[in-house]
Image: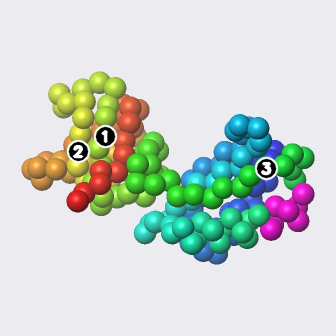
Amino acid sequence: MEIIEKVRLLASNILQDKGIELIEIVYRREGQGMVLRLIVDKKDGVTIDECGAINEQLGETLGKENIFMDNYILEVASPGLDRRLKSRKDFEWVQGKLVRVGTYGPVEDKREHLGTVVSCDDDSVTIELKDGKRARKIPLGMISAARLEVEF
């Protein structure tokens, strides 16, 4: 079993108990050493303390499992407010929130779309435009970039 898959399995057990979702695992050389980075999130966002607790618990578990040949640095972090939205699951995660979506080509004569995610299926995301007048259905395959829009 590949290292990332082993880490995914071990981390999933820890995260599931806390109601936290694993977004991404990266294991790569950075600078002079290896870094194992887990990006985690939950509906209301994860705190620094939660990331620290996961880091500690996962570090202990990984130490017992002895799956790494090299020394490594373990990092557990939140994706932050500028998390890229790519998949149906990502858009379901932010349903009801304001997003900015860029498209490869025009959708209803626009390449940039600002609105609240109202629904998502396997093929598209539907957002209610910021002006509140109508909804726009955007094919997932047309999305070049999408992020949460921070409201002040």
Residue in the image at 81% along x and 66% along y? 61
What is the x, y in percent for residue 42? 50, 65
Name the residue tied to disc 2. Answer: 114
Q: Which mark is residue 101?
A: 1
Tell which residue pokes out farthest to the bottom in this image: 17
In the rendered image, which quarter contains the C terminus? Answer: bottom left
What is the x, y in percent for residue 107? 24, 31
Residue in the image at 60% along x and 50% along y? 24
Residue in the image at 66% along x and 55% along y? 75
What amino acid type should be assigned to the residue bearing mark 2?
A: Leu
Residue 20 drawn above or below residue 132: below
Q: Quadrant of residue 57?
A: bottom right
Does residue 125 appear left or right of residue 67 in this picture? left
- Ranked by sequence position, the earlier of labels 2 and 3 is 3
Between the C-alphas of marks 2 and 1, the distance is 6 Å
- Mark 1 residue crowding within 10 angstroms, few (<14) / some (14–19) / many (20+): many
Q: Was residue 39 drawn as part of the magenta stretch in this picture?
A: no
Residue 1 visible (yes or no): no
Which residues are the magenta region? 60-66
Name the residue tied to disc 3. Answer: 72
What amino acid type should be assigned to the residue bearing mark 1?
A: Val
Answer whether labels 2 and 1 touch (C-beta < 8 Å).
Answer: yes
What is the x, y in percent for residue 12? 68, 63
Between the C-alphas of marks 2 and 3, the distance is 41 Å
Between the C-alphas of marks 1 and 3, the distance is 36 Å
